[in-house]
Amino acid sequence: MDLVYDVRGPLPPAGGRPPLVLIGQPMDASGFGALASHFPERTVITYDPRGLGRSTRKDGRIDHTPETQAADLHALIAELGAGPVEMFGSSGGAVTALALVTAHPGDVTTVVAHEPPLISVVPDAAAVERARAGVRDVYQAKGWGAGMAAFIAMTSWQGEYTDDYFAQPVPDAAAFGMPTEDDGSRDDPLLSDRSWAVSSYEPDVEALTAAPTRIVIAVGEESLTTFTGRAPLALAELLGQQAMVFPSHHGGFMGGEFGQTGQPEAFARKLHDVLDAAT
């Protein structure tokens, strides 16, 4: 397995602060350009998780699991001699970060886990699993555009998944600005079931609360009533804390990568404040 990473700034870092590691899933390092640019004073490390982006895997597997990715991160931090680090994890990257703290708490001083999509912590977990399977089924039947439209419909739904959600017709790809042609591929890590282990991950609350790592659960102000907001709010409660509200939405740190634009400057300012509060 070849794990590809990027280091912005000197190693060892200057200024006495540890490196800042930015991680996503299934997003790779290319989604962090805008956010990294707002930390010019820090050494910033990004990487492509195994099997994603530039990181090719040779283990014959196609699934993505938080435990495996956490082990990769542990190896990367050791290889760079960079630990302990500060870490910002987005979406599935936040799940990986929690798995890393669980397995190797000495690797991370502070982790900001932004909107980890953990199904197990919300009260309507069974309905979320059903909705997730519905997205996969649309993708398998009709391809990427239809699957992405179904995913957007799922993640923009307000509140718990009720009968009203499941009674909706299958979303029209064109209505969501998605391509209607089917290229025949079914290997998308977001729309297939290849990353189900990420959203099915059950956090070890006892290990996380016992860890020396400062854990900050973060949620976007526009996400509060969607699943990607409800999950971190529930997780924060399990950890005995209140989630930290960040500007914008699930991709709030992005500046146009993959066509998504949040409020990267305001987001980075908030992240600066949260990280600086630990010093």
Image (cartoon, grey):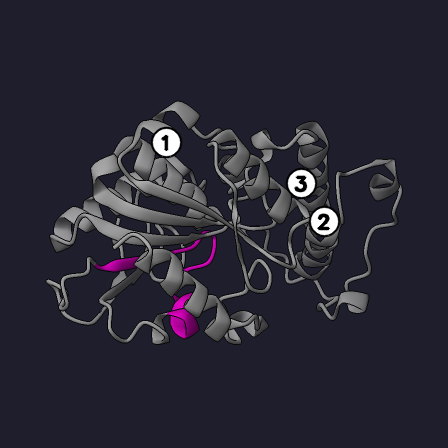
Q: Horizontally, is 207 left or right of 198 in the view?
A: left
Measure how far apart labels 1 and 3 are at the Cα level.
Answer: 26 Å
Q: Residues within 10 Å of mark 1 (few under 14, many from 20)?
A: many
Q: Is residue 72 left or right of residue 28?
A: left
Magenta residues span 19-35
Question: Which comes sooner in the sequence, label 1 or label 3?
Answer: 3
Task: State the residue position of label 1.
Answer: 208
Is 34 one of the magenta-colored residues? yes
Q: Secondary structure at mark 3?
A: helix
The image's mark for residue 132 is 3
Q: Nearer the viewer, mark 2 or mark 3?
A: 2
Residue 193 shows up from this direction? no
Please name whichever residue, 156 or 182, is drawn nearer the observer in this view of the structure: 156
Q: Is residue 119 one of those drawn in magenta?
A: no
Give amino acid for label 2. Answer: Met
Of callouts 1 and 2, which one flags the residue occurring earlier in the amino acid sequence?
2
* Residue occupying image coordinates x 71% and y 69%: 179
x and y percent of residue 17 in the render? 19, 60
* Neighbour tally class for label 2: few under 14, some 14-19, many 20 plus, Cα within 10 Å: many
Quadrant of image for the C terminus: bottom left
> Is 163 above or below relative to 33?
above
Does the residue at mark 1 contact the one at mark 2 (Cβ under 8 Å)? no
